[in-house]
Image (cartoon, rainbow, N blue to C red):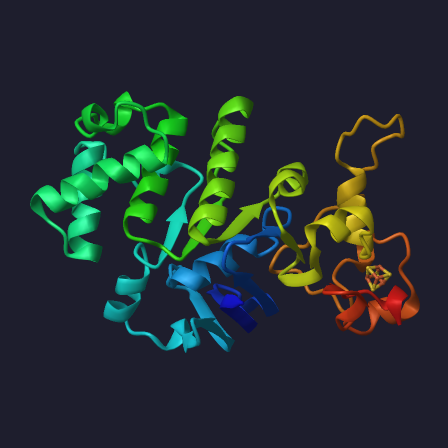
Amino acid sequence: MSILEVKNLNLGFNCECGFRQALYDVTFSLRRGKMSALVGESGSGKTISAMSILKLLPKTAVITGGQILFNGEDILKLGAREIQKVRGAKIALIPQDPMTSLNPLYTVGDQLLEVLKIHQNLEGKEAYKKAVEAFDMVQIPCAEARMKSYPHEFSGGMKQRAIIAMALACNAEILIADEPTTALDVTIQAQIMSLLKEIKTQMETAILLITHDLALVGENADEVSVMYAGRIVEKAQAKEFFQTPNHPYSAALLNAIPSNKTERLETIIGHPPSIQQIINGCKFHPRCKYCMDICTQEIPPMYTVGKNHYSACFLNK
Ligand code: SF4
């Protein structure tokens, strides 16, 4: 069952050169107990799509259409106070750099207690017990003693665990993990991903994984949406996506992942377009080796190419 549905989200920015559209009809959903990945290169629109869910957008951003339904309620219609109740409590962000969420001047325990006070109305012994439990849940060793530590006394992986503990303590229903392991070394990266998988299974949390790393997606996600230049170009169950990618961009991304096979890795020629660049038709056409006349003139619709598998490419016409 979908807990969150992003429907036809259109968003742009007011720049010096005028209004520039950044997201086009972005549509995807999150389900309880599942990890969905939003994959794409930098500037593809994946982070801005995720930040729209939290209404954490730059002042120049303008949402021009669409809905974001959380348990059936449109988040985009919520006022500042109402969204504050949702953000951090029901929908929590695990950022790339945990220091953006932790205050270096307060102990990690005090910050967790503050979160419990604001979002759960808990104080005193009850809050303390819940905080220690949350630290235990994310496997922070010597949880009680660690409550007194400052962020600089935590390693990168431990800081990320503390952020996850804050979300769990508030019983967040959705975790948005924005490149959550980029700043961590490979072993710690695997530990954090395995913790997230445990949480989604045990607590039925829906997780949105934002990443450019397809290997991470292959090992962890249940569903994948690929973004290119502000559009979702392919959507599928992870297993099917990795076995039979349909969109030429997805196929090219997968061919660029190192594997044990002996074939040569392919690179994708050119660069993704900037928000200022106007490209008619399929935005991938300047880089696509299958480009046809129609691709330069019309925007490909989403074609159904399998069970719960969709691809925006004219090769499926
Ligand atoms: Fe390539 Fe055309 Fe498909 Fe776009 S629509 S990915 S240009 S074949």
Find residue 135 and report its image quarter: top left
Farthest residue toward the left? 124
How many circles with numbers are drawn on the protein?
Answer: 0
Residue 226 at x, y percent in the picture: 67, 55
Residue 313 seen by the camera: yes
Find residue 299 and report its image quarter: bottom right
Residue 210 at x, y percent in the picture: 54, 48
Between 13 and 129, the residue placed more toward the observer is 129
Residue 141's place in the image compared with 272, above or below, is above
Residue at 72 percent of width and 65 percent of height: 308
Residue 66's place in the image compared with 274, above or below, is below
Residue at 22 percent of width and 35 percent of height: 132
Residue 12 at x, y percent in the picture: 52, 68
Residue at 27 percent of width and 63 percent of height: 84
Between 55 and 261, the residue placed more toward the observer is 261
In this image, 214 relative to 126: left or right?
right
Residue 147 at x, y percent in the picture: 20, 30
Indicate the quadrant containing the N terminus: top left, top right, bottom left or bottom right: bottom right
In this image, 197 relative to 223: left or right?
left
Residue at 72 percent of width and 47 percent of height: 271
Question: In terms of image quarters, where does ligand 1 lie?
Answer: bottom right
Residue 181 seen by the camera: no
Residue 73's place in the image compared with 242, above or below, is below
Indicate the quadrant containing the C terminus: top left, top right, bottom left or bottom right: bottom right
